[in-house]
C-alpha cells in the first residue's frame, strides 16, 4: 500500500480533516481500504467525522464500497449512532438495505447505540422512500 494511502486511512480513522485533506492532496486514494478491506469512508463514518466523510465523498469515495465482510460506511455510522454521518451517507446514495455476509443491514446495526430510535427512524424513512 502506498504511503499516501496509509496516511489517508490513518487520518480518516482519527477523524482528522486537515490530515485527510493533506493526504488527498498528496495523491492518497479516497477509495483506499485498510487490511480488513474497510474503506476510508467507513473509518471516518465510524468516528463520526462528518467533515472527513464529506471530503472523501467529494474526492470520489464510493458510498457503497464495503469491507471484506460486506460492512458499509452506513452500517458503521449506524452502529455508532452517528446521526449526522448517517444523514450524509443516505443523502449521498448509501443503500440502507445492503446486507453484509451475515445478512445484517444498517437497520440491524442501528439497534446498538444509545440513540438507536433516532438512527432507526432515519434508516426506516430512507427504506420507505426507496419503495416509491
Image (tube, grey):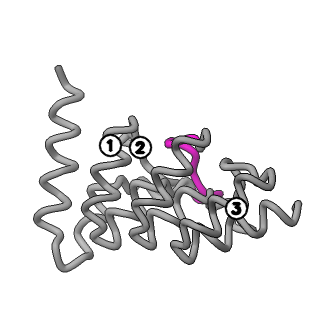
* Coordinates of residue 105 in the picture (x, y in percent): 36, 53
Query: How far is mark 3 from mark 2, CA to CA?
Result: 32 Å
* Coordinates of residue 112 in the picture (x, y in percent): 26, 75
Q: Residue at x 34, y 48 (%)?
A: 88
The image's mark for residue 98 is 2
Instruction: Residue 27: say if magenta.
Output: no
**Residues packed near mark 2 inside 10 Å, few (<14), some (14 to 19) or many (20 plus):** some
For label 3, the residue is 22
Query: How far is mark 3 from mark 1, CA to CA?
Result: 26 Å
Q: Residue at x 50, y 43 (%)?
A: 63
Give the vertical position of 14 relative to 100 (above or below).
Answer: below
Mark 3 touches mark 1? (CB < 8 Å): no
* Coordinates of residue 126 in the picture (x, y in percent): 21, 39
| Quadrant in which the N terminus is drawn | bottom right
Res 48 quadrant in image: bottom left
Give the magenta part as a residue range.
62-69
Depth check, mark 3 against mark 2: the one in front is: 3
Amino acid at each position: 500500500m502506498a504511503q499516501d494511502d496509509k496516511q489517508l486511512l490513518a487520518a480518516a480513522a482519527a477523524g482528522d480533516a486537515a490530515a485527510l485533506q493533506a493526504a488527498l492532496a498528496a495523491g492518497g486514494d479516497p477509495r483506499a481500504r485498510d487490511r480488513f478491506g474497510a474503506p476510508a469512508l467507513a473509518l471516518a463514518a465510524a468516528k463520526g467525522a462528518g467533515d472527513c466523510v464529506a471530503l472523501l465523498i467529494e474526492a470520489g469515495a464510493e458510498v457503497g464500497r464495503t469491507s471484506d465482510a460486506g460492512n458499509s460506511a452506513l452500517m458503521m455510522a449506524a452502529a455508532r449512532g452517528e446521526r449526522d454521518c448517517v444523514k450524509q451517507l443516505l443523502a449521498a446514495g448509501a443503500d440502507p438495505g445492503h446486507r453484509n455476509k451475515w445478512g445484517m443491514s444498517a437497520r440491524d446495526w442501528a439497534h446498538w447505540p444509545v440513540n438507536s430510535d433516532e438512527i432507526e427512524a432515519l434508516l426506516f424513512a430512507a427504506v420507505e422512500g426507496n419503495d416509491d
